[in-house]
């Protein structure tokens, strides 16, 4: 308990410092920022001072941690505020209705040199109306390397660092909001702009476990994408779960025939995949923000490993058609899935175990998302109304999200040149 309160105090201190610095930076001019924040000998000549101002100006115009800082040591700071409201109705046949209402604050500070940085921070998450504070909290601490075409993260880092686009069968939005950190590593690549553009990502995430009980819970996630003429693209996604936790898996109520007091199910393997062929027509329709169409083959393989014997893989494969249009922030998306049901054991373990959209349990469903989104360098506001039809059911979901991110607003502070 004392360690938890210490972490909360550190996070609150970092948050206060971040926003005090943000306020100071907004009021200050570039000249005063150079003189107050950079350690310059008063006897330095005007040429070196102007050079330093140009370095700082170029850094301000780029996102923090994106392209490196040269041969100098910088103090880095930033923060993010997130608001999340999510209401679901009419989905009881496949997914229990609920209302989620929470805020999250995620400050961080660190040091950067060249393309390397080391960051420390965390998040405080509070459910609206909850009597305990915080509802959830944890630290983030990680090493980052960022170059023009390659990035790497090692440690406990925010999932906002992910660059891939993963289908809703993998992750739904509330999962990413309430579990915002990855524990492990991420490797990312994207080629320079050209006729053929390629990108890829690999993530290893040790998200849970108990070493004393020899429980381990982790997944490996990857994406590869090839885009031609900024129009046609092929994308593949994969997600492999290794989940060994008899306390959770024993909820299926099956016990070991040789030991009636021990759960029979000890481990579950899950493999999710997605292959998409699509096209973006914004190049030919420049007045639109988005004009996409895609066709995907996606599915899940699931297998229980029991003390009484190894189970067989269940294969749930299906197909999906996606269409999306957006104009001046207003947009509409429609997806139609058909095929075999996925998430075979959802009735036993629920949405706490499955991170994707539970509607994939159906043999067919349609999803329409009508939304408005406003965004700039530091603010993103999204209002969405989603309509799901499956069997003879109509489910409604309303969502309001807001993100205020200071990372692109304020320049790092130069501590020392080498």
Image (cartoon, rainbow, N blue to C red):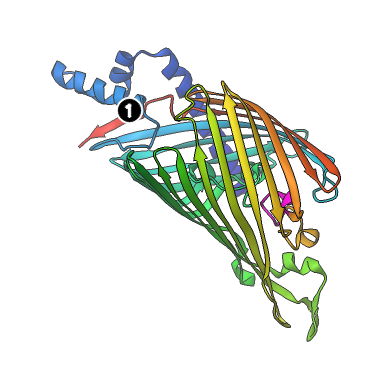
Q: Is residue 153 visible?
A: no
Q: Quadrant of residue 209?
A: bottom right
| Residue 340: quadrant of the picture | bottom right
Percent of width and height locating residue 157: 49, 47
Q: Is residue 386 above or below residue 240?
A: above
Whole-percent x and y of residue 246?
71, 70
Q: Specify whether 170 is left or right of 282.
A: right
How packed mark 1 is, by other alpha carbons closer than 10 Å (few <14, some 14-19, many 20 or more), is: many
The residue lying at 48 percent from left, 30 percent from top is 282
Q: Is residue 393 visible?
A: yes
Secondary structure beneath dot 1 equals helix
Compared to residue 241, the image places residue 371 above or below, namely: above
Q: Main secondary structure of the magenta part?
A: loop
Residue at image x 80%, y 59%? 347
Residue at 60 percent across and 55 percent down: it is: 297
Q: Is residue 160 left or right of residue 53?
A: right
394 vs 39, nearest the viewer: 394
Quarter of the figure with the C terminus: top left
Q: Nearer the viewer, residue 121 or 1?
A: 121
Along the viewing direction, whichever of 192 and 175 lies nearer the viewer = 192
Where does residue 331 sit, x and y in percent of width and height? 62, 28
Residue 228, percent from left and from top? 40, 43
Q: Is 87 situated above or below 182?
A: above
Query: Residue shown at 35%/13% (left/top)?
Result: 29
- Asked if the stretch drawn in magenta spans residue 357, the answer is yes
Q: Is residue 185 magenta?
A: no
Task: Give, as a single range, the part of the protein colored magenta.
Answer: 352-360
Look at mark 1 in the image and give the residue it sits on.
59
| Residue 105 sits above or below residue 143 on the image | above
């Amino acid at each position: 308990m004392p360690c938890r309160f210490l972490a909360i105090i550190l996070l609150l201190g970092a948050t206060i410092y971040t926003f005090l610095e943000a306020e100071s930076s907004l009021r200050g001019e570039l000249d005063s920022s150079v003189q107050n924040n950079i350690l310059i000998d008063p006897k330095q000549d005007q040429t070196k001072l102007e050079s330093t101002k140009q370095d700082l100006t170029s850094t301000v115009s780029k996102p923090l941690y994106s392209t490196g800082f040269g041969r100098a040591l910088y103090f880095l700071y930033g923060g993010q505020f997130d608001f999340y409201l999510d209401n679901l109705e009419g989905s009881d046949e496949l997914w229990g209705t609920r209302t989620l209402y929470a805020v999250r604050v995620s400050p961080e500070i660190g040091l950067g040199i060249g393309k390397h940085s080391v960051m420390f921070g965390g998040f405080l998450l509070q459910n609206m109306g909850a009597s305990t504070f915080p509802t959830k909290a944890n630290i983030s601490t990680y090493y980052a390397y960022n170059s023009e075409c390659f990035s790497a993260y090692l440690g406990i880092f925010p999932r906002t660092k992910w660059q891939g686009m993963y289908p809703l069968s993998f992750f739904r939005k509330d999962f990413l909001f309430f579990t915002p950190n990855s524990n492990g590593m991420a490797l990312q690549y994207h080629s320079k702009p050209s006729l053929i553009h390629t990108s890829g990502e690999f993530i290893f995430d040790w998200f849970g476990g108990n070493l004393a009980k020899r429980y381990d819970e982790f997944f490996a996630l990857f994406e590869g994408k090839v885009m031609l003429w900024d129009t046609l693209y092929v994308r593949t996604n994969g997600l492999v779960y290794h989940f060994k936790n008899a306390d959770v898996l024993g909820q299926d109520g099956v016990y070991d025939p040789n030991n009636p007091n021990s759960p029979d199910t000890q481990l579950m393997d899950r493999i999710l995949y997605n292959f998409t062929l699509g096209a973006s027509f914004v190049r030919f329709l420049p007045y639109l923000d988005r004009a996409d169409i895609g066709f995907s083959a996606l599915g899940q393989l699931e297998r229980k490993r029991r003390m009484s014997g190894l189970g067989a893989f269940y294969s749930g494969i299906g197909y999906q058609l996606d269409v999306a249009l957006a104009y001046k922030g207003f947009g509409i998306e429609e997806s139609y899935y058909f095929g075999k049901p996925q998430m075979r054991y959802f009735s036993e373990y629920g949405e706490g175990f499955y991170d994707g959209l539970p509607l994939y349990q159906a043999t067919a469903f349609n999803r329409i998302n009508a939304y408005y989104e406003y965004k700039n360098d530091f603010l993103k506001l999204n209002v969405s109304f989603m309509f799901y039809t499956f069997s003879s059911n109509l489910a409604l979901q309303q969502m309001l999200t807001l993100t205020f991110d200071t990372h692109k607003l304020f320049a790092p502070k130069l501590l020392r040149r080498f």
